[in-house]
Amino acid sequence: MLTTQELPDCFYLNHPILICPKGPTPKHSLYLSNLDDQKFLRFTIKYLYLFKKSISSDALKCSLSKVLVDYYPLAGRLRTSPENDQKLEVDCNGEGAVFAEAFMDFTADEFLELSRKPNRSWRKLLYRPIEAHSFLDIPPLVVQITNLRCGGMILCTAINHCLCDGIGTSQFLHAWAHLTTKPTADLQVTPFHDRHVLKLPNPPQIIFPHPEFYKTTPTDGLRLDLNEFLQSQTLVPASLTFTHSNILHLKRQCVPSLKCTTFDVLASHTWRSWVKSLDLSPSLNVKLLFSVNVRQRLEPQIPQGYYGNGFVLGCAEATVNEVVTANLHKGVKLVQHAKSSLSDDYVKSIVDLLEDKTVKPDLSASLVISQWSKLGLEDLDFGEGKPLHMGPLTSDIYCLFLPVIGDIDAVRVLVSVPESMVNKFEYYMKDFTINEEKGEINGHCGEENGLK
C-alpha cells in the first residue's frame, strides 16, 4: 500500500524532440474564430492516459508525424495577428509538436490507487518547454510518454484549447491512434480546418442579453467575487463516481412530470451540492455555466470533421435560496431552459459579442462544468488495448464530468473545492432525497450502492 500520494521523479533518457509532419503541408496563417481565441480558452487541455502495456515510442512518433500532415495546424505556432494584437492566429509553419520520453520507477497498479484524485506531483508527467515564458510560447501540441517499471505506460498530451475543443481533441487523438494501429489506412474522419464558418458579416449584431458573460445586478446590493475567494483557498480535489443506479435514483425525482438526460440531472445535483457547501447569502445570484456543442445548432451546420471550438456556454441562474431549497426538478428545468435557449441566432449573437476581446465569462459566482464523458476519450487504443485510466492531468475549480473505464453508463464528477468544504460537498453529493407518493425518504447513499 502506498504511504504517499506523491509520484517519484521522471527520468528523461533523451532530450525532447520536435515531431514534424511527414510530408509537405500548407504554409499559411490560419484564422481563428471568435469562439477559438477568447481569453477564457487561452490554456492547454491536458489529458492523462494509463495503459497496461507500453506502446513503441518509434511507432508513436512515426504515426504522429503522419497524422500531423492532416492536422498540420497542431504542428504550427500561435501568434498575435498583425492586424489586431488582441486576436490570435496560427502560423502553419510545420515547426512540429514536442515529444518527450521518460521513465518512472512506478507501476500501473500503484498509479491506479491514486488515480481518482490528481495532485500537483502529476505535473511532472508532462514536459513543459523550458523556453516557454508565456502561453504563446508553448507549442500547440506537447506529448510525453512515461514508461513504467511494470511495462505499462502513461501518455500525457497538452493540446491548445484555442485550436481544438473537447470534440476536436478526441477526433485528433483517435486519428493518431488509428494511424498507429493501421499505418497505411486513411483517416476515418477528414479534419475540416477553415474557421471562417464562424466568421459573421459586419457589423456585429448582439441581439440578446448574455448572462453567461455579464454579471447580474443584485437587487440588495450584495456583491461577492466567489471565484476570487475560491482561488485564494487551499483547494483539494473531490471525486465522486455515479453509477447507472445512482443516476436513476436522481432521475426518479424528476419523473413522470419531466424527462431529463444524465447531464441535466447530474449538473443540477452538482450545482446544488456546490452552492449548499459554500454557506452563501440566500439572496446572492449564482450561475451554472456548462459547455454545449453547437455544431448542429447553427445554420448552415458546421461541417463534419470541424475540430475547432464549436461550443458555447449555457447559463442557468438563480438565487442561492432558490438553488438550495428547490427540488431537483426545478434545477433540471433551469438547465434544460439554458440549453434550449441556444438557438442559431443566440449563438451568432455570442460570436459577435466576442468580437470585443475584453468580454469574458462571468465567473464571479459560477460553477463551470465541462462534459468529457461523452467524447469517446476512454476508447483510445494505440494497439495494446484501451486505457486503464483516463482523466485530466490536474484538478481545477472547473468541474469535469469524466468517463468511467469499463462502465459506459457511469460518470465521475471531479472538481477542486476549498479544503474546509470538501467533506460537506461530498456529503451533499451523496445525500439523495426522493419524494414519493407515500412520503419523503431521505437516503444517504454511500459505497454500498456504488457511489464512491
Image (spheres, helix red, strand yellow):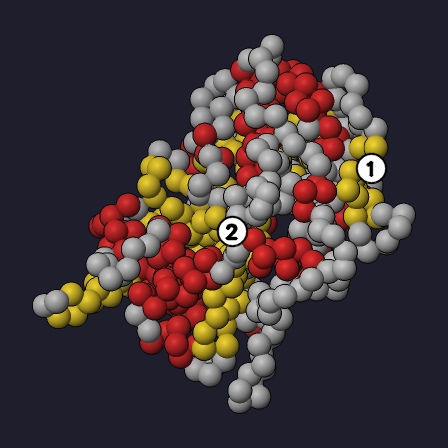
Q: Residues within 10 Å of mark 2 (few under 14, many from 20)?
A: some
Q: Nearer the viewer, residue 393 or 196?
A: 196
Amino acid at the residue labelled 2? Val
Q: Nearer the viewer, residue 417 or 272?
A: 272
- Residue 207: image location, x then y, percent: 63, 66
What secondary structure is marked by label 2?
Answer: strand
Q: Which residue is mark 2?
A: 292
Residue pictured at 67% horizontal, 55% vertical: 351
Image: 324 above or below 409:
below
Q: Which residue is mark 1?
A: 29
What secondary structure is marked by label 1?
Answer: strand
Q: Name which quarter of the figure residue 165 lies in.
A: top right
Residue pictured at 44% horizontal, 41% vertical: 374
Of all residues shown, which one is farthest toward the right? 82
Image: 195 above or below 381:
below
Q: Is residue 80 left or right of residue 122?
A: right
Q: Nearer the viewer, residue 421 or 361?
A: 361
Is the residue under label 2 in contact with that under label 1 (CB below 8 Å)?
no
- Residue 280: image location, x then y, percent: 47, 78
